[in-house]
């Protein structure tokens, strides 16, 4: 696996890292998806491996912040690491569509400028987050999809391209087969619960840099067995990804409900327009608004003071954080 830094540093983005060392507290929070994650189906070895990848993502993003880099660079670096991990539903760990292929989505946003870039239905870009950032930095647009996104990627030689089969993993193939079987049995009238280990995965990162600027990035493979070019909330600015100068949110869960509630923007609007504490805003949207409609999932976020939030209404959410005081950690299940 190519080190994250080699690819990241090869990108010539307009907004580069600052040279000075941090003069104010910084913060970083990441997630690897929320959903049906139970202790009995996650072995100690698997949990250790995925926590190691969460730690690697924290290391990558926090290193950028510690040397005075921008929040935008930090979330880019962190999400690249998560996209290269087979444990999370993004990049190498992406789920299969109903056709047995992979269609990848990503978005990135800088809060104080409201600049944003997003892509959907990407098939051959190893790091969709880099393509989303290239859309933001090198095109007049915000959101490109499918063949158009691929065509734009053709104009960016710094982006690494791979065959769609590079994203294949046996674990995701087994999930596709299980989903197809469940679909057939449901069509025959059976009531089939979601199997253990199934979850709606996404990866994301939110960062606060020493200049007080916030950025957010989200990347996903979508839903197992998806059809018809389905696009969820992750690449939609305001639904699964949003940042302003007071708040940044990356969501994970049943995307249709995050789209309908414009969840990420709702949380940040409560913070920046109504003055709600980010803890209260995120808690209400994730644990009241979305479940009231029948959806589930979680989100990560932070505010301009570096207050980190990680609410979820499922059995687990892969997550990690570095607080302004330098303390850090990772978690999967609800903490006591």
Image (tube, grey):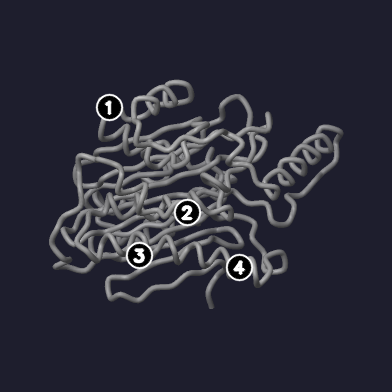
Q: Who's the residue at 58% across and 40% down the image?
A: 166
Q: Position of residue 153 (x, y in %)?
A: 39, 28
Q: Who's the residue at 21% across and 69% down the image?
A: 25
Identify residue for label 3: 308
* First-in-chain label (1 vs 3): 1
Q: Is residue 302 left or right of residue 236?
A: left
Q: Who's the residue at 38% across and 61% down the image?
A: 29
Q: Answer whether labels 4 and 1 touch (C-beta < 8 Å).
A: no
Closer to the camera, 161 or 310? Answer: 161
Distance from Cα at disc 2 to Cα at disc 4: 15 Å
Mark 3 or mark 2: which is in front?
A: 2
* First-in-chain label (2 vs 1): 2
Mark 3 or mark 4: which is in front?
A: 4
Q: Position of residue 310 (x, y in %)?
A: 44, 62
Q: Which mark is residue 82?
A: 2
* First-in-chain label (3 vs 4): 4
Identify residue for label 4: 47
């Amino acid at each position: 696996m190519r080190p994250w830094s080699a690819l990241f540093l090869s990108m010539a983005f307009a907004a580069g890292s600052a040279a000075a060392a941090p003069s104010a507290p910084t913060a970083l929070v990441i997630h690897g998806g929320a959903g049906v994650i139970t202790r009995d189906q996650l072995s100690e070895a698997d949990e250790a491996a995925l926590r190691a990848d969460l730690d690697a993502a924290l290391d990558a993003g926090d290193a950028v912040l510690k040397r005075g880099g921008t929040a935008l660079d930090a979330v880019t670096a962190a999400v690249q690491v998560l996209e290269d991990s087979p444990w999370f539903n993004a990049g190498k760990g992406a789920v299969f569509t109903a056709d047995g292929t992979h269609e990848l989505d990503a978005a990135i946003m800088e809060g104080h400028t409201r600049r944003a870039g997003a892509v959907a239905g990407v098939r051959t870009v190893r790091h969709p987050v880099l393509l989303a950032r290239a859309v933001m930095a090198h095109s007049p647009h915000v959101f490109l999809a499918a063949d158009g996104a691929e065509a734009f990627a053709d104009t960016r030689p710094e982006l690494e391209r791979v065959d769609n089969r590079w994203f294949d993993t046996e674990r995701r193939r087994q999930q596709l087969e299980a989903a197809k079987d469940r679909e057939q049995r449901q069509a025959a009238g059976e009531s089939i619960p979601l199997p253990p280990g199934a979850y709606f995965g996404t990866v994301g990162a939110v960062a606060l840099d020493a200049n007080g600027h916030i950025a957010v990035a989200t990347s996903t493979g979508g839903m197992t067995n998806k059809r018809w070019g389905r696009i969820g909330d992750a690449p939609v600015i305001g639904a699964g990804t949003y940042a302003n100068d007071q708040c940044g949110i990356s969501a994970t869960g049943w995307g249709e409900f995050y789209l309908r509630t414009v969840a990420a923007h709702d949380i940040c609007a409560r913070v920046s327009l109504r003055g709600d504490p980010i803890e209260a805003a995120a808690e209400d949207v994730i644990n009241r608004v979305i479940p009231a409609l029948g959806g589930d999932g979680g989100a990560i976020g932070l505010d301009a003071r570096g207050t980190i939030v990680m609410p979820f209404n499922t059995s687990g959410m892969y997550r990690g954080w570095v607080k302004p005081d330098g303390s850090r950690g990772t978690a999967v299940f609800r903490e006591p």
